[in-house]
Amino acid sequence: MIKSKKKDIRKLSSDKIKDFLVENGEKGFRAKQIQDWLWKSSVTSFDEMTNVSKKTRELLNEHFEILPISVFKAQQSSDGTIKSAFQLHDKHLVEGVLIPAEPRMTACISSQVGCSLTCSFCATGYMDRKRNLDAAEIYDQVVAIDKQAQDAFSTGLTNIVYMGMGEPLLNYKNVLESVDKITSPNGLGMSAKRITVSTAGIAKMIRKLGDDEVKFNLALSLHAANDEKRNKIMPINEQNTLEVLREALKYYFSKTKNPVTYEYIVFNNFNDSLQDAEELYQFTKHLPSKVNIIEYNPISEADFLNAKVDKIQRFADYLSKKGVNVHVRRSRGKDIDAACGQLANKEK
């Protein structure tokens, strides 16, 4: 692939665009117009910028490019879930999912091409990490999935979760920049309280979220509340033990006052006993939080199975009686490549 000499305009700040325009004899105020077209109107070509003169558009076309993502393949489940493989400008694929569940319309988006964390139950964990996504590539997933929601359900997105391919906190700068573009009045204008960033547990970056006093929600993919079990399924736990994570989460809460969500997939005969539920309670009781118990979508690369329905309910009831704010999230898209990474892995 021949590398373009043009610069990706969405990587430039408004000030940089303004400097370029002034240096080329254009009016500085055009920078605000251009930024609005890029981030509020989500245009994918300079020719769509109708209040910018043809001469200015030709100048932009000569020096810059816009590199939007495109839908490579989409699957729609019988329950309404739409899963898409998005193609990036360099032909890599990432996944995004539209999850319609009254009253919510949720976009699940990716932050990396592949993943470096090798969680044993996750399809993405069996893919190499190729690169981080740019802020614009993350933003584009939201725009594309919102369009799918409008087309299929005549309503826009209500929520965004960074729970797709990759570990968001290992792409910290671009993830936070993408949140800014999504929430800014000069962008999509969505409330930060409607956004959740999910991490497998990078303690020092959880602390950094606290230092940066982020407004969005944080979720920890826990899946086991003792170190021996968590080490088996999530190697990241060896450097970020439960005790280290607990202290990082306390610090995060002290800075942001945002409750934490714990995600817990219940695997058959692995972490589904009442003893496991007690350990989960002991871990979560230290700060305001909620627990999402998640049904597992099995993958061919791993031997894990979803726990039995009655066992999941008994697990949830145990936590509820302890005063835990607990929700059981039923699996979506079972009749398509529902597990994270499956569709992109198949199409690569």
Image (spheres, rainbow, N blue to C red):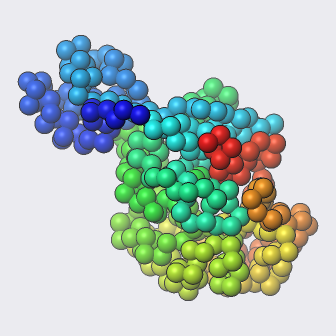
Q: Is residue 321 left or right of residue 258?
A: right
Determine the residue positioned at 56% across, 66% down. Answer: 117
Determine the residue positioned at 27% across, 22% down. Answer: 61
Q: Splitting the image into 4 quarters, where does residue 314 fall?
A: bottom right
Please, is residue 215 above or below residue 100 in the view?
A: below
Determine the residue positioned at 76% across, 63% down. Answer: 302
Please, is residue 106 above or below residue 115 in the view?
A: above
Point out residue 233 in the picture as x, y percentages from the top left corner. Answer: 68, 73
Is any part of residue 290 visible from this angle? no
Please, is residue 180 above or below residue 319 in the view?
A: above
Q: How many marks?
A: 0
Q: Is residue 280 left or right of residue 221?
A: right
- Please state, as top left, top right, bottom left or bottom right, where the N terminus lies in the image: top left
Determine the residue positioned at 61% across, 42% down. Answer: 348
Point out residue 319 in the picture as x, y percentages from the top left corner. Answer: 76, 76
Please, is residue 61 above or below residue 14 in the view?
A: above
Point out residue 239 in the picture as x, y percentages from the top left corner. Answer: 52, 81
Q: Is residue 247 left or right of residue 263?
A: left
Point out residue 252 in the picture as x, y percentages from the top left corner. Answer: 45, 74
Nearest the camera: 29 or 133? Answer: 133
Identity of the residue furthest to the front in this view: 1
Is any part of residue 222 visible from this angle? yes
Nearest the camera: 167 or 39? Answer: 167
